[in-house]
Amino acid sequence: MTETPRTPRSSGLRFEDCRLRPLGPDDEARTLAWRNQDRVRANMYSDHLIAADEHARWFAGSLSNPAAAYRIYEYQERPMGFVSFTGIDRHNDRCSWAFYLGEADAPRGSGAAMELLALDQVFGDLGIGKLCCEVFAFNAAVVRLHKRFGFVEEGRLVRHALKDDQLQDVVLLARFADSWAEDRPALMATVFEGPPV
């Protein structure tokens, strides 16, 4: 792992209060409302307001897409955010991911909890060897969060995507499964209260 916190500190969240569950039919309206928030759209490639019919088409396809897996992050059984694993490529043992918190009042540390649960899911249940992501360079907090969880910067796409009438750089990051079991206990201690799970 490339970067670890100097002083382990947890957010106060408990592991047993947090989970990722599969996206389901009842999540359609919720995910549209989340995705259309200004603070979510600001960090997405596609940042237009999504109409209900456009979202309905995407949602219907998402539930049956074999190359993707979508999850809802819940805290104390309340839906709080969205995680996507896309481009699942079994031949090359990789996929990409993205996530966002949909609820502005999510407890402190929820982003880190989502990241840890996502890594557990992709390297465990999904059995993928390499997890990739793309982050706008201006979103430095998320780049730092990924690096905290062992992502390495693989490159930068310079002046790659138009945001607010300016071409922005995009940081390419990846995390590999082979060191996850070794890195996980220390990361658990920085994210959750209580003994390691």
Image (cartoon, rainbow, N blue to C red):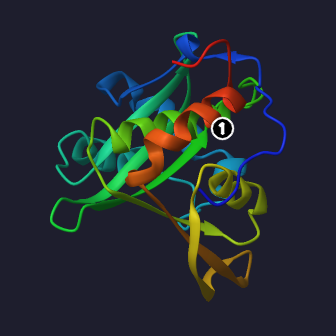
Against 26, residue 126 (above or below) is below
The residue wearing badge 1 is 111
Residue 146, percent across and down?
A: 63, 54
- In depth, the one of 66 and 131 nearer the eye is 131
Residue for point 30% across, 26% down: 25
- In depth, the one of 175 and 39 nearer the eye is 175
Q: Is residue 73 left or right of residue 129?
A: right
Q: Is residue 5 left or right of residue 195?
A: right
Residue 170, percent across and down?
A: 62, 76
Q: Quadrant of the N terminus?
A: bottom right
Q: Residue furthest bottom?
A: 158
Q: Residue furthest right?
A: 7
Residue 27, percent across and down?
A: 40, 27
Against 129, residue 56 (above or below) is above
Residue for point 36% across, 44% down: 122
Question: What SS does tag 1 mark?
Answer: helix
Q: Amino acid at mark 1?
A: Gly
Against 93, residue 115 (above or below) is above
- Quarter of image, res 10: top right
Residue 133, percent across and down?
A: 50, 63
Instruction: Please rate how many residues cluster around mark 1, counting C-alpha atoms within 10 Å: few if below 14, some from 14 to 19, many from 20.
Output: some
- In depth, the one of 55 and 64 nearer the eye is 64
Residue for point 57% across, 17% down: 15
Residue for point 28% across, 35% down: 125
- Quarter of image, res 11: top right
Q: How many marks?
A: 1
- In depth, the one of 24 and 18 nearer the eye is 18
